[in-house]
Amino acid sequence: MKRFVTIIPLLNPGNLHDINYDSFDGEKILTSKIETRFPILIPIDALVQKGEEIAITAVCVERKYVQKNLDDFRAALSELAAAKGFLVPEKNFTVINMADSEDEATHMKLFKDMSRHLVEHNDEEIYTDMTYGTKPMPMIILMALTYAHKFGFDSSVEAIIYGSFDVHSGKNMVYDVTSLFYMNSAVNNMANLNVSDPMKLLEGFMT
């Protein structure tokens, strides 16, 4: 099953607007004509087929505007599901809450909650959107994805994306940074194997 993970925006909903995103590299999974304020809907639109059942994980900071943005995300997802004919049963929609605090205990709790959640499910393709959230949240989510990658059962990290305004082109772009996740995994593996010239090996991966 495909699982789509997203961080729900912290912003005032009045400051969020449905826009069209261009794929930075023209990737098929990030090519969509929909207008949205939630970039995770782009790979959903591009990848999910009629009749397919998917799972959603929404990470929410307990802050003023987040519940309204979560409601708006649910509505946008339901509209897309109706148009495309895919299924998101309520049992497949999980909300992971995080206290509105930047202390270490809060960060560790989110890591544990996300890690346990991701390894509960076997044989999943995981797609993650890092556009929104507090500054530490992408790092915490990446740690949880690493945990799932190392200790999950046949689950794979298929894509890590984020949406942003590109000052050079003047367009709204969506970027795929999955390669950085796997590069980090390679660095950790090489450290464990005591590779004599790790940079040379990494440069081979980068070509």
Image (spheres, grey):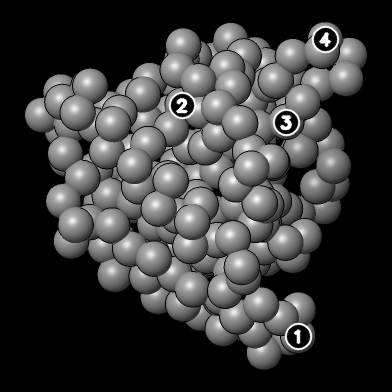
Distance from label 1 to label 2 (Cα)? 33 Å
Question: Element under label 3?
Answer: strand
Q: Earlier in the sequence, mark 4 or mark 1?
A: 1
Rendered residue at 66%/51% (across/down)? 12
Give the CA distance from mark 4 to mark 1.
38 Å
- Answer yes or no: do the residues labelled 4 and 2 have beta carbons within 8 Å? no
**Rendered image: mark on residue 169:** 4
Residue farthest toward the left in the current orientation of the protein: 51
Dot 2 amino acid type: Ile
Query: What residue is pinned by disc 3?
Result: 164
Report the residue marked by disc 1: 103
Q: Is residue 8 above or below residue 96?
A: above
User: Badge 3: how crowded within 10 Å, few (<14), some, or many (20+)?
Assistant: some
Give residue 166's position: percent from left, percent from top: 81, 21
Image point (26%, 62%), residue name: 121
Query: Which is more N-terminal, label 2 or label 4?
Result: 2
Q: Quadrant of the C terminus?
A: top right
Picture coordinates of residue 52, whole percent (x, y):
15, 33
Q: Is residue 67 above or below residue 7?
A: below
Amino acid type, label 3: Ser
> Visible in this render: residue 146?
no
Q: Position of residue 81 (x, y in %)?
A: 24, 31
- To which quarter of the image does residue 95 belong? bottom left
Q: Residue furthest bottom?
A: 105
Disc 2: which residue: 42
Q: Residues within 10 Å of mark 1 (few under 14, many from 20)?
A: few
Give percent across and percent down for residue 57.
39, 57
